[in-house]
């Protein structure tokens, strides 16, 4: 339970994105979490009903498989961007916004995947620094900040599958 979460979370409370009383939320956010949960239940119900109309096999092919593939990439990209061995870990006294923004690496997943995901992985450092920057300017901005950041700019050209293996090997879980 909460094996990799914030150390200040209570040990006896379940940390969960679906529970309104979870310590990751402020008390005033509870109603929004309930609305979000209801929206998800409604969406799942609609997908189920569509499956009864058009067959669940067709729904699996047209919705479930693409959903799983996209989420596999999103989780993989997030994991590899934020668990890189060169990404520092700061305590409360050392951390500040800029250090936090630089806690990631850029990496390419190949030209087609980079294009399909609007260059979020190969311009991730820029995304952290300028989150409101439109994706279509991210490559240009990345090239502009590299000389400014110098040694603080991190890029990893390790093969993605090898990087996944290496990161997992280093993980305590």
Image (tube, rainbow, N blue to C red):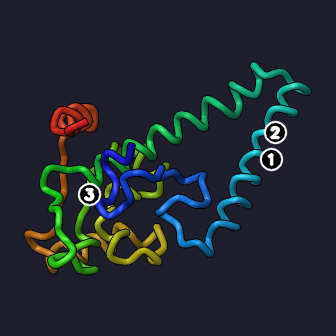
The image quadrant of residue 151 is bottom left
Pick whichever, 107 or 32, lies toward us. 32
Q: Is residue 24 left or right of residue 152?
A: right
Which of the numbered marks, if any, corresponds to residue 42?
A: 1
Horizontal side of 7 relative to 77 (left or right) equals: left
Residue count near mark 1 (Cα–Cα under 10 Å), binned few <14, some 14–19, many ≥20: few
- As drawn, is 86 to the left or to the right of 25? left
Tell me the element at label 1. helix
Q: Secondary structure at mark 2?
A: helix
Q: Which residue is mark 2?
A: 45
- Please determine whether, in this image, residue 168 is positioned above or below residue 99: above
Mark in front: 2 vs 3: 2
The mark lying in front, picked from 1 and 3, is: 1
Q: Residue at x 54, y 72 (%)?
A: 26
Q: Which mark is residue 106?
A: 3
The residue that appears at 28% across and 80% down in the rendered structure is 97
The quarter of the rendered structure image containing the C terminus is top left
Residue 117 screen position, x and y as percent: 47, 52
Mark 2 burial class by Cα count in 10 Å: few <14, some 14-19, many 20+: few
Residue 11: percent from left, percent from top: 36, 53
**From the viewer's perspective, is residue 143 above or below residue 78?**
below
Of the image marks 2 and 3, the number of the one nearer the N terminus = 2
Q: Residues within 10 Å of mark 3 (few under 14, many from 20)?
A: many
User: Which residue is located at x 38 percent, y 77 percent?
Assistant: 130
Question: On residue 18, which mark appears?
Answer: none
Tag 2 near tag 1, CB within 8 Å: yes
Q: CA distance from mark 2 to mark 3?
A: 38 Å
Q: Of callouts 1 and 3, which one flags the residue occurring earlier in the amino acid sequence? A: 1
Q: Nearer the viewer, residue 108 or 76?
A: 76
Q: Position of residue 147 (x, y in %)?
A: 14, 76
């Amino acid at each position: 339970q909460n094996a990799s979460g914030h150390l200040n979370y209570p040990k006896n409370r379940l940390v969960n994105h679906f529970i309104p009383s979870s310590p990751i939320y402020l008390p005033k956010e509870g109603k929004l979490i309930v609305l979000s949960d209801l929206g998800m239940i409604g969406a799942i119900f609609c997908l189920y009903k569509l499956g009864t109309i058009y067959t669940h096999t067709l729904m699996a092919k047209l919705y479930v498989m693409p959903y799983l593939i996209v989420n596999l990439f999103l989780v993989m990209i997030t994991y590899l961007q934020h668990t890189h061995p060169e990404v520092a870990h700061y305590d409360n006294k050392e951390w500040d916004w800029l250090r936090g923004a630089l806690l990631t690496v850029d990496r390419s997943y190949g030209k087609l995947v980079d294009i399909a995901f609007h260059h979020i992985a190969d311009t991730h450092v820029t995304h952290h620094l300028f989150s409101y920057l439109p994706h279509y300017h991210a490559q240009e901005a990345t090239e502009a900040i590299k000389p400014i950041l110098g040694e603080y700019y991190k890029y990893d050209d390790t093969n993605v599958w090898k990087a996944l293996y290496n990161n997992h090997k280093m993980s305590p879980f």
